[in-house]
Amino acid sequence: MFEIKEEKREGNYGKFAVFPLAQGYGLTIGNSLRRVLLTSLPGLAVTSVKVAGIKHQFSTLSGMKEDIVEFILNLKKVRFSGDADKVVKASLEVTKAGEFKAGDIKVSGGIAVANPDLILGTLNKGSKLSADITIEKGVGYSPAEDRPSETIGLIPVDASYSPVKRVSYKIEETRVGRLTNFDKLIIEIWTDGTITPHDSLIESARTLLAYFSQVVNPKKVEKPKEEAKNDLGAVGKLSVEEIGLPTRVANALVKAGFESVEQLAFAKKEDLVKVRNLGEKSLKIIAAALGTKGVEFLAIK
């Protein structure tokens, strides 16, 4: 048995001691907790922004001291407290000259800005800024490249969701009776203010517990029925030219984007009848060719 003692708490900083631990377990527990604390705790972050009058991030807004890249870099530092399972929309409307801050962001859905004094930019007299901001919940880090947008002016933002900014730990020797070969784990946690160090430590332990529970009491993992149904294996990877279709039919399918058996087997009839040179007779030919490979043609069911 061991105990956990909070040795120090200052704002968003906490220092904890875990002792006594059997030799070697200080490193095992400390490293595990550190990894989970830094990468697996959920948080809220800005994922995209759209500034009125701006088409891309390498632009400048008339009357704003900072360019759009600088503005986005500052926006990435804004932290949000609260919980949201859905995408949260926020807005930033600035018309006054001078510095504007994170606290000027209007957020709904029970979400609040945790660092309202963060300076986002500076406006000159007579200028204004209007921006629509998207906030999402996630874990770890999500680069903007993973969320490309085709909407002109909508700029994806690198999102760092983790509410924990820094974690460090060390192992000290401690005594239990006459024995001195026990470990004492000292772990220090710095958060962004949206969660306390103590709560972040508890949440990280819960995450590890959930994983270890699957080892102790494994639950059967069932393959989704839809996925199993659509898994044709090696046959699904065959091209339409390889299943004995007439050249005319095969060429028409390829031009329409139905290049593999898998794409063809699960295609909708209304999409296939739009393909030039394909009619009801061609669909029957396709069904027969797929049947020779043991594949059911859903379009004519």
Image (cartoon, rainbow, N blue to C red):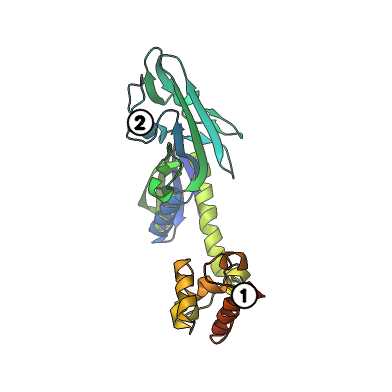
Please give the name of the residue rendered at 57% of the width and 34% of the height, measured from the top-left corner. Answer: 111
Please give the name of the residue rendered at 47% of the width and 77% of the height, measured from the top-left corner. Answer: 248
Camera-side residue of 44 and 169: 44
Q: Residue furthest right?
A: 301
Q: Earlier in the sequence, mark 2 or mark 1?
A: 2
Element type at mark 2: helix
Spot occupied by residue 250 in the image (x, y as percentages of width and height): 47, 76
Spot occupied by residue 191 in the image (x, y as percentages of width and height): 44, 39
Q: Quadrant of residue 96?
A: top left
Q: Residue furthest top?
A: 125
Q: Is residue 190 left or right of residue 208?
A: left
Spot occupied by residue 294 in the image (x, y as percentages of width and height): 57, 85
Q: Which residue is mark 2?
A: 68
Please give the name of the residue rendered at 59% of the width and 76% of the height, measured from the top-left corner. Answer: 283
Above or below residue 52? Residue 47 is: below
Camera-side residue of 295 and 301: 301
**Quadrant the C terminus occupies:** bottom right
Element type at mark 1: helix
Above or below residue 33? Residue 281 is: below
Residue 39 in view, yes or no: yes
Which amino acid lies under the numbered mark 2 shown in the image of this protein?
A: Ile
Spot occupied by residue 195 in the image (x, y as percentages of width and height): 51, 39
Residue 12 in view, yes or no: no
Q: Mark 2 or 1, which is nearer the eye?
A: 1
- Asked if the residue at tag 1 contacts the one at tag 2, i.e. Cβ–Cβ closer than 8 Å, the answer is no
Q: Which residue is mark 1?
A: 280
Which amino acid lies under the numbered mark 1 shown in the image of this protein?
A: Glu
